[in-house]
Image: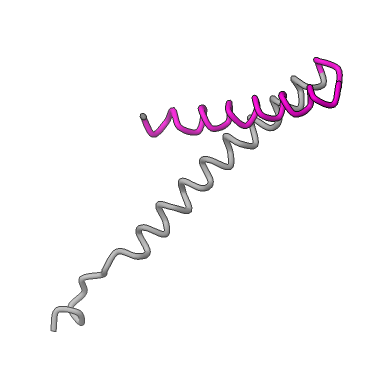
Amino acid sequence: MPKQLKPFIEGLAVGCVFISITMLFEIPLYMSFIIGALAALGGYRNSIKMDREKAAKKEQNQPNTSKQDIE
């Protein structure tokens, strides 16, 4: 899966889940779509944030090869 497509798919999945949940409570359809859209936006932003944190953690765990380590 392309790295740029992953946040969109995760955001869409979160939005669909929230729409499904709000439909169970018999909330009007337009309100369910608004809640789903906001949840999708949040899921998209969260996915990007988690990818950045994962990359930073991976970079932090890489061994540094400085002169002190070689000697």
The quadrant of the rendering that contains the C terminus is: bottom left
Where does the image place residue 52, in percent across and percent down from the top left?
46, 49
At x 53%, y 32%, the residue is 10
Image position of 28 with respect to 12: above or below:
above
Q: Is residue 4 magenta?
A: yes
Quadrant assignment for the N terminus: top left
Query: In the displayed structure, does residue 4 sit left or right of residue 43?
Result: left
Question: Which residue is pictured at 42% across the width and 59% down the height?
Answer: 57
The residue closer to the viewer here, 60 or 28, is 28
Q: How many marks?
A: 0
Q: Residue at x 42, y 56 (%)?
A: 56
Q: Please state the horizontal and vertical placement of residue 26, each as a whole percent of the image.
A: 86, 21
Q: Let me know if residue 38 is in the magenta part.
A: no
View extreme (top): residue: 29
The residue positioned farthest toward the front in the image shown: 24
Residues shaded magenta: 2-30
The color scheme shown is: one colour
Residue 49 placement, left or right of 56: right
27 vs 37, left or right, is: right
Q: Position of residue 24 (x, y in %)?
A: 80, 25
Vertically, is 46 above or below 54? above
Residue drawn at point x = 14 percent, y = 79 percent: 70
**Quadrant of res 62:** bottom left
Is residue 41 depicted above or below 54 in this figure?
above
Magenta stretch prevailing secondary structure: helix
